[in-house]
Image: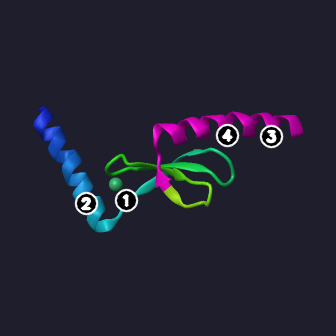
Amino acid sequence: MSIIKIREINFSGKIFCSFLGHKMVTTRNVTNHFKEYKCSCCGLELTNDLKGHKTFLTPELKDINETLVSLYQKRHFSVE
Ligand SMILES: [Zn+2]
């Protein structure tokens, strides 16, 4: 498959999403309130911000989520 063909598929995926909305699937549970999502159609990644709204998953937010996961797991395991 040529590079041009792959680009066409990505492009049509984004068009599809802009009409029908993203098809988000949960890729990771950070905590009970923070999750990471990915669109199975175009690959767009989202996460929850501090107010619980969905926002774009930037490298900075990914770092914060990593920290939250390790803190959450430590706390979870020490309680049990
Ligand atoms: Zn999408």
**Most foreground residue, 26 or 52:** 52
Q: Is mark 1 within 8 Å of ligand 1?
A: yes
Residue 73 among those drawn in magenta: yes
Give the x, y percent position of residue 46: 47, 50
Q: Find the distance from the CA under tag 3 to the CA under tag 4.
A: 12 Å
Amino acid on which the number 4 mark rests in the picture: Leu
Query: In this picture, is 20 found above or below 9?
Result: below
Q: Which residue is mark 4?
A: 68
Q: Which residue is mark 1?
A: 22
Residue 16's label in the rendered image is 2
Within 10 Å of disc 1 (Cα), the crowding (few <14, some 14-19, many 20+) is: some
Circle 2: element type = helix
The overriding secondary structure of the stretch rendered in magenta is helix
Residue 73's label in the rendered image is none
Circle 3: element type = helix
Position of 16 compared to 63: left or right?
left
Q: Which residue is mark 3?
A: 76
Circle 4: element type = helix
The residue most toward the right is 79
Marks 4 and 1: CB-CB under 8 Å? no
Place residue 18 in its image quadrant: bottom left
The residue at 11%/37% (across/down) is 4
Position of 44 compared to 59: left or right?
left
Q: Find the distance from the CA under tag 4 to the CA under tag 2.
A: 33 Å
The range drawn in magenta is 55-80
Of the two numbered discs 4 and 1 in the rendering, the one whose residue sits closer to the viewer = 4
Residue 80 visible: no
Residue 79 visible: yes
Within 10 Å of disc 2 (Cα), the crowding (few <14, some 14-19, many 20+) is: some
Upstream in sequence: badge 1 or badge 3: 1
Position of 5 compared to 72: left or right?
left
Give the x, y percent position of residue 19: 27, 67
